[in-house]
Amino acid sequence: MCIGTIKGCEKKLIMSFLSLVVKNPFRNKTRSALAIVGISIGIIVIVALGMVTGGLENSTQSTLKAGAAEITVIQTGSSSFGSGGSLNESLAASLLNISGVKDTAGILRATNTSTTVATTTSNSSSGGFGAEGGVSVTGIDANKLSLIGVDTINGTAFTNTSTNQVIMGTTIAQSLNKTVGDTIDLYGKNFTITGTYETGNFITDAGIMMPLSTLQNLTNNQNKISDVLVKVTDNANVTTVSQSIENAYPNQLSTTTAADEANRINQGLSFINTASWAISLLAIFIGAVGVINTMIMSVYERTREIGVLKAVGWRDRRILGMILGESIVLTLLAFVIGTIVAVVGVELILTLSPSVGGIIKPSFAYDIFLRAFVVAFLVGVIGGLYPAYRASRLSPTEALRYE
Amino acid sequence: MNNNENIIEIKGLKKSYDNGKIKALNGMDLEVKRGEFISIMGPSGSGKSSLLNMIGALDRADEGSIKVAGIDLMKTKKLYEFRSKEIGFVFQMHNLIPNLSVLENVQIPMFETKTSSKDMKKRALELLKAVNLEDKINQKPTRLSGGERQRVAIARALVNHPSIILADEPTGSLDSKTGEVILNLLKDLHSKENVTLVMVTHEPYVGKMAERIVTVLDGKCQNIIQSSQAG
């Protein structure tokens, strides 16, 4: 151990300008800690919101994934979700005649609000996924699952002739604490879960799928469908095909492309992003004021010391670099603390609340952390610039006289 | 190096503050030989500290000429470089940096000299040994006595091999016994390192330790006597 003699202490004795810059901010621990807390709050906001909105953006992107249908066709005037069967099942086959259409799938979307499911859900640890709006159930042909984005299934798909088999999105499975082989009550009937799926789309992953005919019978929608999913040929233009469908069925059918859907969600996310930046900037501004205050106080208190450094030959540039460096040390430390708190906080919230956790898969994209780092660094530079300039311009004689 | 050459040459030096209302130096003339030990005495406000600041290039004069270690301080722009290479300061209040260890405090002036970390350490340890503080190198200044702090300040002043040590009331905040130890140390190091020592003091017994006593009054050098004649 190094007690204070020359022998055995060699490693400890080497001092660099950098170590001085790192040490100095902690001379007044309370003040520095408060400045760090201020900046950390801003960093937490940037990282946490970045992770959440990034996760939602990833989910949106998955709606555009290869293999899935590019166009959704619904009856003009009806809503896309939970509208019941308003179209004739034969429409799916008719649409195949339109140029550019490669494949179609007629689906029926319904919402199961049966007491059994609602009770099960509200009693679950999730805090009630589906308790308010029920569970989204989609009827679809088993061999058309890829058109809705279900490429891989953990377990097996239901058989089209079955009347008691379903597959379940991972989000709702997690929320209801169900797995392959378990049963679930839907519309007063017991269904076996033959498989679970994960598409990356938080809406699809929060639903249940069963054979089209089974759902039609359960909801009294025989031969009826709510949407037709359309996959276009490789060389076809999605917008042109979409327009052709609407032209073929004027005032009857409306189309939405996956790109439109993604754009709409992205617009919402863009709004969230803007709001999160506004909140972040406010937090950063408050933090920056804290840093400026800390550094100005530090320079005031160390005026005499700065005079000594000038007296022993330190150039103005070195003093400027020292104070600026100290400011950057504070904000980079705030970046580290803020990032850790944000990551742990987001993970903790999503773990404690599986219903939210199932919908939002936080993004760990490097640009979120890079953005926070750049912000922290810039706040350090901006916050330290004036105090550093002031310190570097101090007259040595006046600084040495300072009491 | 020739000890007969003048290391400090000051002629007609003037410095005023507060828009000329306060004349700190009013035509100061002074010559100091290399390796000499002089003390500057005089009442408060006589211009002692201003003279020290001019020699140490902490401030620029308004008029006159001042050459220190062959450098014209009225003309040179890189005053920091001059201070780093030629001057070592010892202040009354030692002015050590509280969060740095004794050793780190001594190394501080070497940052501008492009000395390697290894050489910085070697030189600082050498001086701390010379001031009998080799067992306190990792301690913070706040844990040292007044005399020990001043010894650290002396080591710091000598670390860059300066030509001149400027000591402003180096014993002013010490008791007489500790003050005497510090003065003997300064005198001893001044001889060993062949460094010119210019010391400002109020105390006649401190002044008498120098080879010459320069009395400053109203911003001028009034009297220069050899210490042996000081009586």
Image (spheres, rainbow, N blue to C red):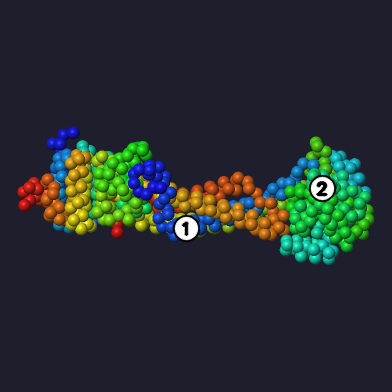
Q: As rendered, which of A31 and A352 lies closer to the eye?
A: A352
Q: Position of residue A48 (x, y in %)?
A: 61, 54
Q: Chain of mark 2?
A: A
Q: Quadrant of the N terminus of chain B?
A: top left
Q: Which residue is mark 1?
A: A33
Q: As rendered, which of B139 and A153 lies closer to the eye?
A: B139
Which residue type does callout 1 highlight? Answer: Ala
Q: Using a 10 Å C-alpha cutoff, classify the residue at mark 1 as few (fewer than 14 neighbours), some (14 to 19) or many (20 or more).
A: some
Q: Which residue is mark 2?
A: A155
Asked if residue A24 lies left or right of residue B148, the reply is: right
Residue at the (76%, 57%) spot, across then down: A177
Q: Marks 2 and 1, how far apart in space?
A: 53 Å
Q: Is residue B31 above or below residue B24?
A: above
The answer to whether residue A306 of the structure is visible from this angle is no
Q: Position of residue A7 (x, y in %)?
A: 35, 43
Where residue A18 sits, quadrant-wise, is top left
Q: Is residue A255 above or below residue B81?
A: below
Asked if residue A379 lies left or right of residue A6, the reply is: right
Q: Using a 10 Å C-alpha cutoff, classify the residue at mark 2 as few (fewer than 14 neighbours), some (14 to 19) or many (20 or more).
A: some
Q: Disc count in the image?
A: 2
Is label 1 in a helix, a strand or a loop? helix
Most extreme residue toward the top is B1
Q: Position of residue A75 (x, y in %)?
A: 86, 54
Q: Chain of mark 1?
A: A
The answer to whether residue B145 of the structure is visible from this angle is yes
Residue at the (73%, 62%) spot, across then down: A125
Residue at the (16%, 56%) spot, across then down: B202
Asked if residue B129 lies left or right of residue A108, the reply is: left
Where residue B126 sits, quadrant-wise, is top left
Which residue type does callout 2 highlight? Answer: Gly
Sequence-first disc among 2 and 1: 1
Residue A140: which disc?
none
